[in-house]
Image (spheres, rainbow, N blue to C red):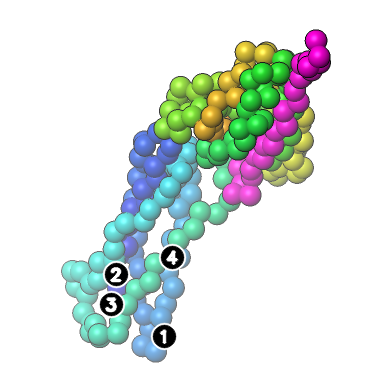
Amino acid sequence: LGAEADLALVGVNEDGQERTLTIQEPIAPADDDRAVVTEIVLDEQNSGIIEFLNNLPTSITLDGGVNVGGSGEIGTVHADDHAVIGWEIIAPVEVIIDASHIDGDPEPLDFDEDLRERIADHAGAASVRLAVLNHLPVGIEARILFSPDTTTIRTDPLLEIGPVAVEAATVDPITHEVATPRLSHPTIALTADQMQVLATEGLYEMFSVTLPSTDGQPVRVLTTDYVEIEGLISLDVHVHDDED
């Protein structure tokens, strides 16, 4: 028996906004002695996949089913007959990016009590040196957020370091895909007051990346594109002679 796929891909971005991509396509019947594969290809010409991906979904779920038979269809369905559905989004795709944020997971700063006391009592100005490996075809801005509360670290951090601008990766002029990532080492100066915040007990840190808008121009993004950030804090320490 022939059938029809009645499916929906639901993508949700980090702000909870949903986009739905519906699929309603005929499925060929099996042969007498073997299963038959029906391939359904959705692209920018026959579907709303561009709008779906421009929502920058962080999760995608597949819902729906397969409707068997229909008007004029005659056949026999056995107990072991079945339909299996698989799907994938094939990169690269060209997307238009609106200004958006990509946040890492909050991680404990892991300063022990002795180090926190040294920072509180002796730390002066300091600097943070980042190592940012950008494997995206667009420039980014990077920040480090600190807070003792992981639920508000994104919206109301106790301390925000940055942002610093990082250039885009090198893009192949023919394929428009990233050819080589770009490694940057921006340095951010911190005041003594900012350093005092790092002496707070139970502090968490989180890296946050801002992608600027591409102003309506499409860029080619692969599933293998990424951003890696590492940071090193250098302190100026006031040393006192106990005999003075």
**Residue 166 lies in magenta, yes or no?**
no
Q: Is residue 242 left or right of residue 82?
A: right
**Image location of residue 130, percent across then percent down:** 72, 30
Q: Secondary structure at mark 4?
A: loop
Check disc 3 and give the amino acid type.
Leu
Q: In the rendered image, which quarter contains the N terminus?
A: bottom left
What is the crowding at mark 3: few (fewer than 14 residues within 10 Å), some, or many (at least 20)?
Answer: some
Q: Which residue is mark 3?
A: 1
The mark that comes first in sequence, 1 or 3, is 3
The reply to whether the C-beta atoms of the residues labelled 3 and 2 are less than 8 Å apart is yes
Q: Which residue is mark 1?
A: 34
| Quadrant position of residue 230 | top right
Check disc 1 and give the amino acid type.
Arg
The mark that comes first in sequence, 2 or 1, is 2
- CA gap between label 3 and label 4 equals 20 Å
Vertically, is 20 above or below 78? above
| Quadrant position of residue 104 | top right
Q: Which residue is mark 4?
A: 86
Region in magenta:
215-244
- CA gap between label 3 and label 2 equals 6 Å
Residue 61 visible at all: yes
**Image location of residue 93, percent across then percent down:** 57, 45
Check disc 2 and give the amino acid type.
Ala
What is the crowding at mark 4: few (fewer than 14 residues within 10 Å), some, or many (at least 20)?
Answer: few
Label for residue 81? none
Q: Nearer the viewer, mark 2 or mark 4?
A: 4
Q: Nearer the viewer, mark 3 or mark 4?
A: 4
